[in-house]
């Protein structure tokens, strides 16, 4: 073709044009070449979309090739689309090379055939393996489900046995606890004749414990009350000891009873759950998925520890029943008669209470007088505080004037911005005002501190006065009022 002849003449063949001449001289010329938009140098180009004119510099022909003489005229390459061919049938034969060879096409088809055969054979093997896995899984799961059901049945038998044991022991403990309660009531009745005087004396001590702060004084009144309690406690020591033992034994029996009841309830619940689980099958209703439940282990005991724990609860109940029987025998055999004269301690306690009331009344009157004086001083101090704050507030205006003057003078133009006597006077004035304000603040702080001290003093006086009024009310009204009906003659019947 025409362009191939020109390429052969230029000595380029299928290589890319170089802008140098044979003699090595660089000569620019204007040549029109078709340019493909997505041109790649590593593969033969093939124009298919668009073209453009570019400026290239072909080399000068210095020798003749194929009968052509060298000339200085630039070479013109025909457009490959429109072409200068005399035969229009060759106008669109513009591709110098195809993208793939026939051998490459054949190799690609062979690759696809081999890949399809390989995937088919692998899929067939995978299907056969899947069927074997499904059959094996069905057999194992069925066997596991059968074993689990058998173990649930064994567990139901164990829980039923221990539930019956716990129920029998609980019934025996109920009967023993009831008998111990009756013995406790007998001992408690023996102490009832002393409960009145003891309760009244303890009530007096309890009321005096309501005193607050420094009024909690261990005075003669409190000593007399404590002596009364001590005398009463000595007389009923044995009865109380027996009664306390009965109460403690009842508590321990109730603790064992509570453990038995709780264990019985838990076993009944567990038995119901296991029986429900034993009845479940693959066709039961209400079956659900619980994601990750096999990884959660809430169990708190093992099989052996579970049986040992139940056995320990039953053994503890048996021990408590034996102790209760021994204590009942001792309590029923205990009979004590006591009598005591309380008139002396009664009179001494009343005299001590009267003396303490007189002292409290005198201290209360003195505190009220000092409180009035402190209150007046607080009033005067508050007036001084208001005066000082107002004086400080008034200095703000003078300080604002000085600041405003100083700021306004900073706007003087050019050389007029002079550090004159006025500038120095304003600066000194501001310093003096700040100094005076600081002094007043210090004085205000001292007055405020003194005011706080006065308030604390008043608060302390008021608290102390309230404490004394409260203590006086307790001694005169509550304690003495209770002791007006004090039973000085007590008969003890057992």
Image (cartoon, rainbow, N blue to C red):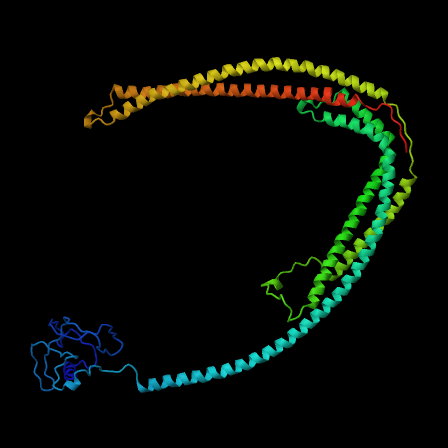
Left-right relation of 119 to 242: left
Q: Position of residue 228 (x, y in %)?
A: 82, 25
Q: Nearer the viewer, residue 168 or 345?
A: 168
Q: Position of residue 385 (x, y in %)?
A: 46, 18
Q: Quadrant of the C terminus?
A: top right
Q: Quadrant of the N terminus?
A: bottom left
- Residue sitting at 64 percent across and 13 percent down? 366
- Farthest-out residue, front: 285
Q: Position of residue 359 (x, y in %)?
A: 71, 15
Left-right relation of 197 to 1: right
> Does the rendering let one see residue 439?
no
> Does the rendering let one see residue 236?
yes
27 is higher (above) or lower (below) than 308? below
Q: Nearer the viewer, residue 258 or 487?
A: 487
- Residue sitting at 9 percent across and 79 percent down? 62
On the image, which quarter does residue 441 sit in? top left
Left-right relation of 381 to 279: left
Q: Position of residue 279 (x, y in %)?
A: 70, 68
- Residue sitting at 77 percent across and 23 percent down? 482
On the image, which quarter does residue 266 sit in? bottom right
Total numbered labels placed on residues in the image: 0
On the image, which quarter does residue 414 sit in? top left
258 is higher (above) or lower (below) than 220? below
């Amino acid at each position: 073709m025409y362009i191939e002849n020109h390429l052969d003449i230029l000595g380029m063949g299928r290589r890319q044009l170089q802008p140098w001449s044979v003699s090595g001289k660089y000569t620019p010329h204007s040549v029109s070449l078709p340019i493909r938009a997505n041109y790649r140098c590593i593969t033969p180009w093939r124009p298919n979309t668009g073209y453009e004119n570019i400026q290239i510099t072909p080399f000068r022909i210095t020798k003749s090739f194929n009968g052509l003489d060298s000339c200085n005229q630039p070479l013109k390459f025909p457009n490959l689309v429109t072409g200068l061919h005399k035969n229009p049938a060759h106008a669109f034969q513009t591709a110098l090379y195809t993208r793939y060879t026939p051998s490459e096409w054949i190799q690609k088809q062979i690759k696809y055939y081999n890949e399809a055969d390989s995937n088919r054979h692998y899929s067939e093997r995978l299907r056969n393996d899947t069927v074997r896995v499904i059959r094996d899984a069905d057999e194992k799961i069925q066997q596991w489900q059968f074993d689990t059901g058998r173990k649930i049945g064994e567990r139901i038998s164990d829980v039923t046995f221990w539930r019956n044991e716990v129920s029998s022991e609980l019934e025996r403990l109920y009967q023993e606890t009831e008998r111990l309660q009756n013995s406790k009531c007998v001992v408690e009745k023996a102490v009832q004749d002393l409960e009145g005087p003891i309760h009244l004396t303890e009530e007096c001590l309890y009321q005096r414990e309501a005193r607050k702060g420094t009024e909690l004084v261990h005075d003669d009144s409190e000593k007399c009350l404590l002596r009364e309690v001590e005398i009463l406690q000595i007389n009923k020591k044995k009865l109380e000891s027996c009664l306390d033992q009965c109460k403690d034994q009842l508590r321990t029996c109730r603790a064992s009873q509570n453990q038995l009841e709780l264990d019985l309830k838990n076993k009944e619940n567990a038995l119901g759950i296991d029986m429900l689980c034993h009845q479940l099958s693959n066709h039961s209703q209400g079956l659900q998925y619980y994601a990750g439940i096999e990884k959660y282990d809430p169990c708190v005991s093992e099989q052996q520890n579970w049986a040992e724990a139940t056995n320990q609860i039953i053994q503890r109940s048996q021990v408590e029943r034996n102790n209760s029987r021994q204590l009942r025998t001792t309590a029923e055999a205990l009979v004590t008669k006591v009598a005591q004269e309380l008139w002396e301690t009664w009179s001494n306690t009343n005299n001590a209470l009267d003396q303490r009331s007189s002292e409290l009344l005198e201290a209360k009157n003195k505190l009220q007088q000092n409180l009035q004086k402190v209150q007046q001083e607080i009033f005067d101090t508050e007036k001084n505080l208001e005066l000082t704050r107002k004086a400080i507030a008034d200095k703000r205006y003078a300080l604002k004037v000085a600041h405003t003057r100083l700021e306004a003078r900073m706007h003087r133009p050019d050389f007029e911005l002079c550090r004159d006597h006025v500038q120095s006077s304003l600066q000194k004035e501001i310093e003096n005002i700040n100094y005076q304000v600081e002094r007043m603040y210090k004085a205000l702080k001292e007055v405020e501190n003194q005011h706080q001290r006065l308030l604390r003093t008043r608060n302390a006086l008021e608290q102390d006065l309230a404490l004394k009024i409260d203590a006086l009310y307790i001694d005169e009204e509550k304690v003495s009022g209770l002791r007006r009906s004090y039973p000085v003659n007590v008969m003890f019947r057992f």
